[in-house]
Structure formats: C-alpha cells, structure tokens
Image (cartoon, rainbow, N blue to C red):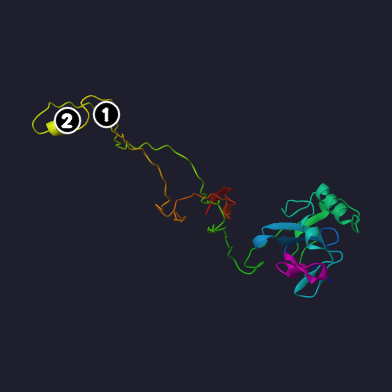
Amino acid sequence: MINASNASDIVGATVLGAGDHKIGTVGQVYVDTTTSEPTWVTVKTGLFGSSESFAPLDAADWDGQTLRVPLEKDFIRDAPRVENDGQLAPEEEDALYEYYGRGRGTTGTATDTTAGFATTGYDAGTTTTEGYDTSGPTTDDAMTRSEERLHVGTEKVEAGRARLRKHIVTEQQTVTVPVSHEEVILEREPITDGNVGAALDGPAISEEEHEVVLTEERVIVSKETVPVERVKLGTETITEQQQVSEGVRKEVIELEEPETDVRRGL
C-alpha cells in the first residue's frame, strides 16, 4: 500500500503496467495536502526517460521494489500533457481525472490541494516540492548534470541503378576508291618497210570491220562484323563531406544566492 510514509521510496522504481510489461520509472509523487495521501505519480518513459506522463495511484500496487499499475503503456503515454512543476493546477487535474475515468478524489476539493513530491515526515499543511536527481533522492549534497551526446554513423542504401543497353544505329561512311576504264583511241601509222607486208595482206579494195572490247572497273561493296572493344559497368567510391545538424539537450545548473538573488550558469 502506498501512503505518505513510504511515498518517497517509490521514486526511481520500475513501473510495470498490464501484463507486467515495463512502462518506465517513477519520476515524482504528488500528494494531497489535505489528506497527506499520494494521488498521482509521474512515469518517465521514452529514450533515457525523456518524457513524463501522469498516472493515478488509486489502483497501484507497491511491493517494495516495483510499482504496478493496471494500465497499458500506450494509454499512460497518451495521457494529457501536464507541466511537471511540483503542483497541479485545478484544470490540469480535472483533465487527468477525465482521461482516466476517475472521480474527484476523497476530499472533493479543488486540485490546488495537490502538492509536489512527497517526502518522509511530510507536513500536510505545507506544500513541499523536492526534485529528483539521477543519483537518487536525498542521497548526498551533489547534483548530477547530464547532457545528450550526438553519435553519427552511416549506412548503405540504394541510391539508384545504372545499366548498359546496346542498340544499332546506321551512319554513312564515304570512302574514295580509284577505278579505271578503257576508252577508244584512234592510232594512225604510216606504211613502212616494217608493216608493208601486213598492209598488203588481203584484197586491194574491200569493206571490213574491226572491233575492240573495252573494260572498266566497278566498285564492289561488302561488309564484315568485327569486335572493336569490350564495355562493362564498374563502381568507384567517392567520399564527400556532409554536415548533420541535430538538437541535443543538456542540463544547466544555476546557483541562486539568497542575498542578491543573482543567477549565474555553472
């Protein structure tokens, strides 16, 4: 059973939901200043407990190490967003009661009777809010300051595909080829002692015909297919610099000096 005497013990404890599935860890406990009884608890969820959601304690069970609430994790995470500043405003608690289907509580008073984190020896007439540090509540005089660190890596993903495709095109080639042909020329030679015999061979007067065959060269075109080169696809790795910008959070500890009420960053 959770009451004013053991409320501080559950801070930092593991929170299990329906089916004993882990939801997160306890952040702060909110108690009613009239009855001194714990009424709400904040549950840290998300990566490194970066998100806190309110959950009711009326049906919760505490075994000394683990806090069990009969609710689903997603249901708690989807609860109305309420500023975790140590005190619930009436309209904020009204929204939580409506979301979880609860009544207004045992006192029937307004929500301004809800105080912050309950500590051992809590005085019901005083509103006391104590923060929770990752080193544990009230463990020592030191406060742990944390910050997020940015880790950047790479992964290989498909960026596109290239393929080779072969098709046929026709282009005109002009080649100059020397060709020869024969033409008729008329040759006359006088009668000499050397050719007189051939000249007088035959009738003295007659009709005759002589012909000569003329020849010429014609261009013959033929084609053959020959391999000229081999083409294939390859890859090469190009390294370039890319800038990545991402917001990281860090905690800043401020010192408040009562005499001068001056805040300065550490």
- Separation of disc 1 and disc 2 at Cα? 22 Å
- Give x and y (percent) for residue 118: 76, 63
Depth check, front residue: 75 or 116: 75
Quarter holding residue 105: bottom right
Pointer 1 local density, CA inside 10 Å: few below 14, some 14–19, many at least 20: few
SS of the residue under disc 2 = helix
Q: Amino acid at mark 1?
A: Val
Q: Amino acid at mark 2?
A: Ala
Write the start and end of the magenta stretch as one range: 6-25
Residue at image mark 1? 184
* Residue depth check, mark 1 versus mark 2: number of the one nearer the observer: 2
SS of the residue under disc 1 = loop
The earlier-in-sequence mark between 1 and 2 is 1
Depth check, front residue: 187 or 192: 192
- Residue 199: numbered disc: 2
Q: Is residue 93 visible?
A: yes
Does 153 sit left or right of 178 as displayed?
right
Q: Is residue 2 visible?
A: no
Position of the N terminus, as image quadrant, is bottom right
